[in-house]
Amino acid sequence: MTKQETFQLEFENHVKEGLSAFPKFLSSKYIYDDRGDELFQQIMALPEYYLTKAEFNIVETHKSKLRKVFNAHGAFDLIELGAGDGKKTKVLLKELVLNEVEFTYIPIDISQHAIDDLTHSLTTLLPSLEVQGEQGTYFKVLERLATYNKRPKVIIVLGSNIGNLEHPQAIDFLKKIKEVMSSKDLLFMGFDQKKNPLTIQNAYADSQGVTQEFNRNLLHRINKEMDGNFPVDNFEHWESYDPETGTAKSFLIATESCEVEIKKLQLKTFFKKWETIHCEISQKYDDDTVEWLAHQSGLQIEEIYEDHQKLFKDYLFKIKNKTT
């Protein structure tokens, strides 16, 4: 079975489980096909969506320092989980290439389309760069990361992707990364910060409705790939942010009652009016919470990088010293 066939089977099993549950749920990671990738690019360009701009500012401001930190032990593998279009990473890659640092870039993404586009664009931008793109989910790929042990690894996870996990799952994720790290390896990871709740609310409920179309792409994919009949226009996006817990949640809400049939799965499911599908969480953090997550995972914070507007932070981690 190919990677794509395995991924498709996982998607189908997830849809069957999520739409048979109460309350219903679907993971946002399955939004990303060609259309989902395109919509996410539009989201990142929205004025309300501060995350990409803030982290871009961090990488641009600290690229020289990051180059020296990453290259401290000589040649290394730069492994990026959730590479996407690589907009922020390209700033760092250019810094490394121009300074003749010896490294291999291994971008990993759930979307083959994203990997293909990124690899193609890097061939043009940085012809001398060695790129080894891989398609897959984080946890599947993490199992293979252990094979990259001939030289130090720098694992980067940008865009606050960890925010899509609840704290127990985030700790599990960090532990899995820690298990494939040596004492010389580094983890560089983005965490969106707690801030004015309205700033967060607007970032995930934009006035142009792009985020709504992005979330609806889940239903379009089910209709197209599993012979479903979701009345997509009858499902609206809803975002709620709890400033106490720092948790933003995304839902699709049925504005009319309907019965949905997904023929490939031999599944029929009924939606009451105003019934929800929980699609995503986007967790927000502060330093204390990140330090706690690191401690629980066997990691320690080496350095913290913040954007000029103090909206977002990237944390540099190493394996925790036994004496710490």
Image (cartoon, grey):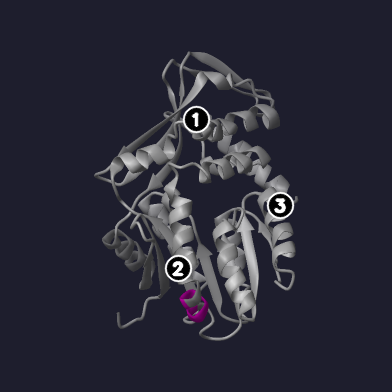
Q: Is residue 126 above or below residue 226?
A: below
| Pointer 2 residue | 61
Q: Residue at x 39, y 59 (%)?
A: 171
Specify whether 21 is left or right of 287: right
267 or 99: which is nearer to us?
A: 99
Badge 2 amino acid: Thr
Say few, some or many: other residues with alpha carbon within 10 Å of mark 1 (under 14 / 14 to 19 / 20 or more).
Answer: few
Secondary structure predominantly adopted by residues drawn in magenta: helix
Q: Foreground residue, 201 or 279?
A: 201
Residue 29 can be seen in this image:
yes
Which of the two labelled residues, at mark 2 and mark 3, occupies the earlier sequence position? 3
Q: Position of residue 264 (x, y in %)?
A: 69, 28
Query: Which amino acid type is shown beneath numbered disc 1?
Result: Gly
Report the magenta residues as a range: 65-69
Please say if the residues under marks 2 and 3 sit with CB atoms less than 8 Å apart. Answer: no
Q: CA distance from mark 3 to mark 1?
A: 33 Å
